[in-house]
Image (cartoon, grey):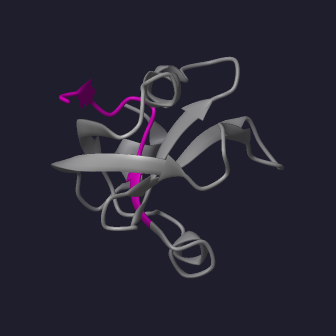
């Protein structure tokens, strides 16, 4: 189990319609090996898929290589860092080892 899931207060699961990307493509974080793909849902909420550069980025590329819009079912957590909720408006985080399935 990843750091993300171990440190979350609770793990949830839901379905989301992904309609676009906030940053256009997967991005590497500036200060570590974290990779992210920031997506917009049909409710204009930000769902962020996380991975590790040189490690597991399968969830990121499963979404990025899909044709939008795409419907997914995934586990997610609330953002672990308050600044990401406030400054970047992240609503949901899907860690690299969270379950993810394309459903439509």
Residue at x-position 44% and y-position 30%: 63
State the image coordinates of residue 25 (x, y, percent, origin top left). Answer: 66, 38
Quarter holding the N terminus? top left
Bounds of the magenta segment: 91-104
Residue situated furthest bottom in the rendering: 86
Quarter holding the C terminus? top left
18 relative position to 27: left or right: left
1 relative position to 58: left or right: left
State the image coordinates of residue 68 (x, y, percent, origin top left). Answer: 41, 36
26 relative position to 28: left or right: left
Quarter of the figure with residue 99: top left
Quarter of the figure with residue 69: top left
State the image coordinates of residue 48 (x, y, percent, origin top left). Answer: 48, 50
28 relative position to 4: left or right: right
Depicted 96 relative to depicted 93: above or below: above
Residue at x-position 57% and y-position 70%: 84
Depicted 20 relative to depicted 28: above or below: below
Residue at x-position 60% and y-position 72%: 88
Residue 23 falls within the magenta-colored stretch: no
State the image coordinates of residue 74 (x, y, percent, origin top left). Answer: 25, 39
Residue at x-position 25% and y-position 42%: 75
Depicted 51 relative to depicted 29: above or below: above
């Amino acid at each position: 189990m990843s750091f993300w899931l171990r440190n979350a207060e609770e793990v949830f699961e839901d379905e989301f319609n992904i309609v676009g990307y906030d940053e256009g493509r997967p991005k590497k974080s500036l200060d570590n090996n974290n990779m992210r793909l920031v997506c917009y849902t049909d409710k204009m909420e930000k769902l962020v898929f996380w991975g590790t550069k040189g490690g597991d980025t399968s969830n990121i590329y499963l979404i990025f290589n899909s044709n939008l819009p795409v419907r997914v079912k995934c586990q997610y957590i609330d953002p672990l860092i308050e600044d990401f909720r406030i400054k970047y408006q992240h609503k949901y985080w899907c860690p690299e080892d969270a379950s993810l399935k394309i459903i439509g």
